[in-house]
Image (cartoon, helix red, strand yellow):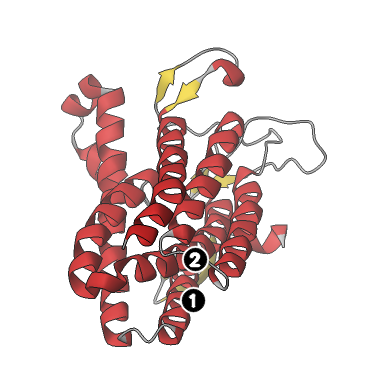
Amino acid sequence: IYTFLMHPVLFFFRGRPVTTYLVLYTLAIIAGAAVILILSRREGLDLKEVLASIILVTLAAKFGAQLYAVGLSFFQNPNFFIKHPYRLFRIFRTGGTYHGAFIFGVTFAYFYLKWAFKEKFLNILDISFVGVALTQAIGRLGCFSAGCCYGRPTNLPWGVDFPHLGLRVHPMHGLRIHPTQLYESILDFLNFIILLSLYKRKKFKGQITGYYLINYGVIRFFLEYLRADGGRGYIIKAQSPLLSFSIPQLWSLLMISGGILILRFLPRQGKRS
């Protein structure tokens, strides 16, 4: 599986490379959308409206991921990008960042889904996060194929030497590093299984949303200690990763806090209504 996933180009179409990253991310979105549509059908939701919502939220998340990456890069090195503004366009053309996708996607989804589904808003939100967990699990395999989102050097037997980063030589080539993409993929698959099993016996609307925020927040917070790729941004930057505190870790703590608040207060609102 390593050999297959670590091929940056899966095949050529009319002389142009089709990357493994692109194929896996496309499959990830399709798989997540399929889960959302299947669960929505069981809930008796309008599937045409659900499909339209998936497309719109996905586009908003994609734009947010790219815009966040551009903003974070500029914030970290404004003088460089003022002199070389075209480099920002290159960053915008990348896959972007998860937290940018989450912030923009959830913000758009909150207003759009609340308008489109009204009293069933929390139902579709719960369903969506089950699908998102699966999308992330498959999507991280795409990150592994591209060599991005990579980890720190390790002596562990499963350490990986990436020959490439996208279609370029990997900056860590020659070193065995943590396959953090696979770590997260496994944990995201586990999160998907947990959320799906909880969904079948959930006690109140919004419960799955709360658990997703907590679960993924914890996953990402601790994996940050093993990540070595640049462009993440740090609030506290120390020589030891254990003493550092990254911007993604801040977002993770906010997600965990939001999930805890949802699980604590939404059941009370349900009893009052």
- The quarter of the picture where residue 53 lies is bottom left
**192 or 28: nearer the viewer:** 192
Q: Quadrant of residue 201?
A: bottom right
Amino acid type shown at disc 1: Val
Q: Is residue 222 left or right of residue 95?
A: right
**Separation of marks 2 and 1 at Cα, in angstroms:** 7 Å
Q: Quadrant of the C terminus?
A: bottom left
State the image coordinates of residue 248 (x, y, percent, origin top left).
43, 35
Query: How far from the left and from the top, in percent, is residue 39?
Result: 47, 79
**103 shown above or below 240:** below
| Residue 114 horizontal side relative to residue 212, left or right | left
* Among numbered discs 2 and 1, the one appearing first in the sequence: 1
Residue 17 visible in the shown view? no
Q: Residue at x 47, y 68 (%)?
A: 131
Where is mark 1, residue-wise? 35
Q: Residue 35 or 6: which is nearer the viewer?
A: 35
List the residue tagged with mark 2.
130
- Where residue 40 sits, quadrant-wise, is bottom left
Q: Vertically, is 235 above or below 251? A: above
Question: Considering the image in quadrants, where does the N terminus appear?
Answer: bottom right
State yes or no: discs 2 and 1 in contact (Cβ < 8 Å): yes
Furthest toward the right, the residue is 157
- Residue 259 visible? The answer is yes
Q: Residue at x 30, y 55 (%)?
A: 106
Label 1 SS: helix
Q: Amino acid at mark 2?
A: Val
Q: Name the residue at 66% across, 64% down.
A: 4
Residue 133 pos. (x, y %): 51, 60
Q: Which mark is residue 238?
A: none
